[in-house]
Image: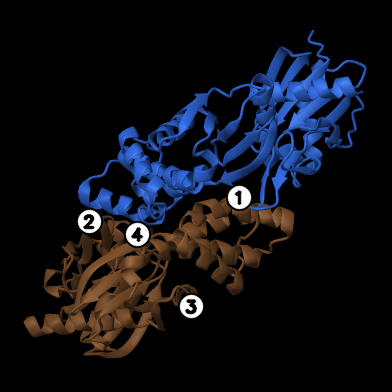
Chain colours: A brown, B blue
Amino acid sequence: MVRPDWIAVDWGTTRLRVWAMQGSEVLENRSSDKGMGSLSRDGFEPALLELVEDWLGDQPIPIIACGMVGARTGWAEAEYRHTPCTPLDPQRATRPQVNDPRLDVHILPGLSQIDPPDVLRGEETQIAGFLAQNPDFEGTLCLPGTHCKWVIITDGRVEGFHTFMTGEVYALLSRQSVLRLTIGDAKPDRVSFLEASAQAATNADMAAAGLFPLRAAALLNGLTPEQGAGRLSGLLIGSELASAHPLWHGRRVVIIGAPELSSLYAGALTQAGADAHQLDGGELVLSGLTAAATALTRNT
Amino acid sequence: MVRPDWIAVDWGTTRLRVWAMQGSEVLENRSSDKGMGSLSRDGFEPALLELVEDWLGDQPIPIIACGMVGARTGWAEAEYRHTPCTPLDPQRATRPQVNDPRLDVHILPGLSQIDPPDVLRGEETQIAGFLAQNPDFEGTLCLPGTHCKWVIITDGRVEGFHTFMTGEVYALLSRQSVLRLTIGDAKPDRVSFLEASAQAATNADMAAAGLFPLRAAALLNGLTPEQGAGRLSGLLIGSELASAHPLWHGRRVVIIGAPELSSLYAGALTQAGADAHQLDGGELVLSGLTAAATALTRNT
């Protein structure tokens, strides 16, 4: 019988992941597809209980959650803390009302920035996890995904950040625009990727100008789906690097994300002259949730 | 009873439009939603007959068609003529096999360009229509739409052209990305549009960097859907202008397309210092089809 002393929860738009924890030790972990995006407000507590109920004893147990569960359309809106600031302040977590008195839920705040306007939810916990393991890091974290977050770290704090929608733009263009006829679900060819990212990183104009030529090159010159995927990805990531230049130029960059996508960012950044390193960030979120749980216990 | 001596056909991806013609005079016109995109190869002849059968007499009648009907996935593939060249050469039309001997169908060729690779189908006929009415024009035609075509005209010929996917990118981002929560079907606010297009026209980086801030500004600063739509459209069209700079800078530009979208391009171009004029291009395609029919009659 698993009896954790707290429960860690990573609740994103599409997935719910939970860990039964004893201090920093994982007793068991589970997940479901009941992400925030598929739930109405009264669906959150049942979705959580479905995964954790047999871990509960008689007493209330701390449940530390991060991610889109704290969005305006989530379980309960968690605030955004304004940068510059430390990534986490669990004292400012939101406590949703619950029906089951054994659930003592804390939803961690996200981060916001006034100019340029930006927000994040969930990544603050990954950042805290990274800093728990690398307390002296100074530089930039690059977190690729549907949206890519560039986060400037100074003295253990988030100085500022910038979100690019590159992953989502790639998915829409490759699968739903006219380029679906050329690319679809093909895997990016790395040579084509590096060539296009080098062009777009030095000339961001390329991104707009280079899209339709992919379709035309498939019709006229036999461009393959993999080459098309590589060039599209290269144009988009390259123009992201051009825009994000002040965020990585002359700074140490650590890339944290899914291995394939991270490897594309690492290749493009290195080619552009950056000091970039890839890190498997698989359980950083758990490390951040553990840091939050420790801080809460210490303060209560 | 309508008895045309030829039939004009504009057959795009989503619409089929036909005109019963006597020389350059329109006797009647009709349309249906049987665009190329919804038809398999053996569906074209029935879709055409549905609209024109009662116009047919005993003898074969010339039917002059342009647009995506000539695509590889259309009725019969029409060739691409390589630029630089005149917009039309009806002698090189493709003649699909037909079951009804009264149909003498000519599908006009499109245009292609080797470097950068590009293609168009249908616009060549609009261009021919424009040149039939403005034979001495020297400058650039800008044809906004789902895809925007910039066409360089010199001495009655198409010197080169460049396609931007701006309209399609706008539709995908505003309705299907996370920005749908901020923008959706809102109409672009013109002040926001002009401000964003000015920024992106001088700094194409803005397009990638400026997307997610629209979502954040809606969450944090109360950006309205109309302001969001204006800014998104401005970022995308502005970065198109930055990329297309050599195509319009120091040249006379005529914008031909749907009035609302054309007016955005006209505003952004004028603000960027271009000599740009809007033209209602409603029936240019018919004027081009008429020029093709005249040339065919003269040569047979």
Specify the quadrant of the image occupied by residue A162: bottom left
Quickly name the residue at label 2: A115
Q: Quadrant of the C terminus of chain A?
A: bottom left
Q: What is the crowding at mark 2: few (fewer than 14 residues within 10 Å), some, or many (at least 20)?
A: few
Q: Is residue B51 visible?
A: no
Which residue is depicted at the point 53% across and 31% down? B252
Q: Do callouts 1 and 3 point to residues on the same chain?
A: yes
Which element is circle 1 on? helix
Q: Are marks 4 and 1 on the same chain?
A: yes
- The residue carrying mark 3 is A263
How far across and how far down the image is residue A98, in percent?
19, 66
Q: Picture coordinates of residue A261 (x, y %)? A: 48, 73
Say which label, 3 or 2, has the lower sequence index: 2
Residue A238 image offset from top left, x and y in percent: 47, 65
Which is more toward the observer, A250 or A164? A250
Relative side of A266 to A110, left or right: right
SS assignment at label 4: loop
Mark 4 vs mark 3: in front: 3
Answer whether labels 1 and 3 touch (C-beta < 8 Å): no
**Mark nearer the viewer, 1 or 2:** 2
